[in-house]
Amino acid sequence: MAETATELRKTALNAVHRAAKAKMVDFGGWDMPVDCCGLIAEHMAVRTAVGVFDVSHMGDIQLRGPGSLAAVQRLCMNDASKLQVGQAHYSAMLYPNGTFVDDVVVHKLSDNDYLIVINAGTREKDVQWVRSQIGSMPGVHVNDFSDYYTQLAIQGPRAAETLQKLTPVDLGPIKNYWFTWGQVCGLHNVMIARTGYTGEDGFEIYIPSDEPTSARVWQEVLDAGAEFGILACGLGARNTLRLEASMALYGHEISDTINVFEAGLGRYAKLDKGDFVGRDALVKIQEDGGPKRKLVGLEMIERGIGRDGYPVFSLDGKRIGEITSGSPSPFLKKNIAMAYVPVDFTALDREVAVEIRGQMVKAKVVAMPFYKRPKKAS
Amino acid sequence: MAYPAGYRYTKEHEWIEVDGKVGTVGITDYAQNSLGDIVFVDLPKVGDSIEAGKTFGSVESVKAVSDLFAPVSGTVTAINEELKDAPEKINSDANTTWMLKVELSDAKQVDGLLSAADYEKFISEETGH
C-alpha cells in the first residue's frame, strides 16, 4: 500500500481528510476517503439531516464557442437544445455501438458555454474522447477544467439550510437540476447547483481548488451544519446512498459492454433530436426488439448479502446474470442489489438465486429505485 | 488501541484467549476498523470442528466480506449468540466481543501464534506506518 500511495492523485482536501483520520482508499487512481466517521452513520446523516462529500475527483469539461451546442448534441445522448441557461440534465456519451463512454451531467452556462461533469475514473479517457469526436467541428473550444475546482456535495434534507448560512443567494427558488452563481463563504461567482448523487435534496458547489480555500470552505460547511448533525461523508456512504436511489455507477451498471436500453436509461436518449454518436446503434437495437437483458433491482429473501460481481442463477440452476452493485441498505435495512438478467426474468417478485460464496441464496426482483425521498410537505 | 498482552494473534487478524483447554476467539481492533460497520457474522455450530489456518466463518461489513481463520484446531463449544442481532458490538469493542469458544485439540498450536507485541509490529509493517 505504501508504495502505490505516492502515485495516487489527491484532492485539495487530502490533508484535511487524513488529519480527520478518515479511512482512505484508491478509487480510480485517487486517494479518497471511503469512511470518515462510520459508513452507516454517514449514510443516515444524509437521509435524515445533512452530510458533506469531497467530490473534487470528478472531472469537468467545458465546451465553449458558437459551435458548443452542436458539439454537445453530437457527443451526448440527451437533448441539450432543451436546456435553458442555468439548467442541467443527466446525459451520457456513447460509443458508436450504443454502449457507454461515461454518464455525465451537462450544465448550460450560457448559449455558447456548456460544462460537462464527468466521472473520476474516466477523466483522461473522456477528455480524449471529446477531443477526438469534436475533431474539426467549427467554433468550439474544449477545456479540461477538472483540476480547477474543489467540488463539494452538501446533501440531505437539511442541506439547503446548511448552505443558506454561507451564502446571500436565496437557495429556495433553485429547482432540482438547476444552478446559479453567487457568493459562498466570501468567494465570488461560485457555481451552486442543486444536484447530487444520493437520492436526497442537496447542492454541489464548485470552488477554487487551492488547498487553503478548500480547507476553509470545508470547515465552514461543517460548522454551518453542526446544529443539524452534519457529518463528513466518504465514498462508502456515497455508494450505498446512490445504490438505494438506483443511480448508475460507471464500471458497474454502465460500461463499454452495456448499452443504454439494457441499463434502463433509454428515457435520456433522445433519438429524435438529430444525429449523435451511438444513435444508429440504439435505433437498431429498438428495431431488433429491444435489449435481451435488463438491469433489475434485487432484494435478498434469504439471509446473505449479494455483492458486486456475484453470479445470479435461475431457481433451476442456470446462470443468468451478475450483480453489478450489491450491499446491505443502511436505510431500508435490507440486502439489495442491482443485476443484469435476461428480460424474461425482470417481472416484479420473480425469484432468482444469488451465489454467495458457494451457497445459493434466494432473492426476488423488486421495483427501482429502492428508495425515493419523501415529497416535501408544503 | 492496545492489544491485550494475554491474547495470541493470527496474521489474519483473529485473537484467541486460552484458558486451560478452552480458547475464546474474536477479531482484532485492527480488523474491525479495516472492515468498518459490521452487519453480519457467519459462524459454525456448536459441535463443529475447526482447523487451524482454515476458514471457519465470515464477517461482513457494509463494504466488504472477510473470511475468519481458525487460530487453532478443535471443537466449537459455544458461539456468541448476541452477534446475530448485534454484530456491531464487534466495532465498539473488538477485544472483548468474542465469536466462539473452542476446545483445543492440540494446545501446542498456541505457541505458534503471535504475541501482542509481534502482532502490533506485524500490522505496523502491513500498513506502512
Image: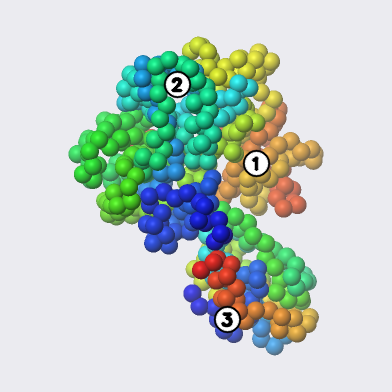
Of the image marks 1 and 2, the number of the one nearer the N terminus: 2
Q: CA distance from mark 3 to mark 1?
A: 42 Å
Query: Marks 1 and 2: CB-CB under 8 Å?
Result: no
The residue at 68%/17% (across/down) is A289
Query: Does the rendering let one see residue A378?
Result: no
The residue under label 1 is A323
The residue under label 3 is B117
The answer to whether dots 3 and 2 both sit on one chain is no
The residue at 34%/44% (across/down) is A209
In the image, farthest residue toward the front: A136
Q: CA distance from mark 1 to mark 2?
A: 32 Å
The residue under label 2 is A72
Amino acid beneath label 2: Val
Which image quarter is the C terminus of chain A in? top left
Query: Does the rendering let one see residue B40?
Result: yes
The residue at 48%/59% (across/down) is A23
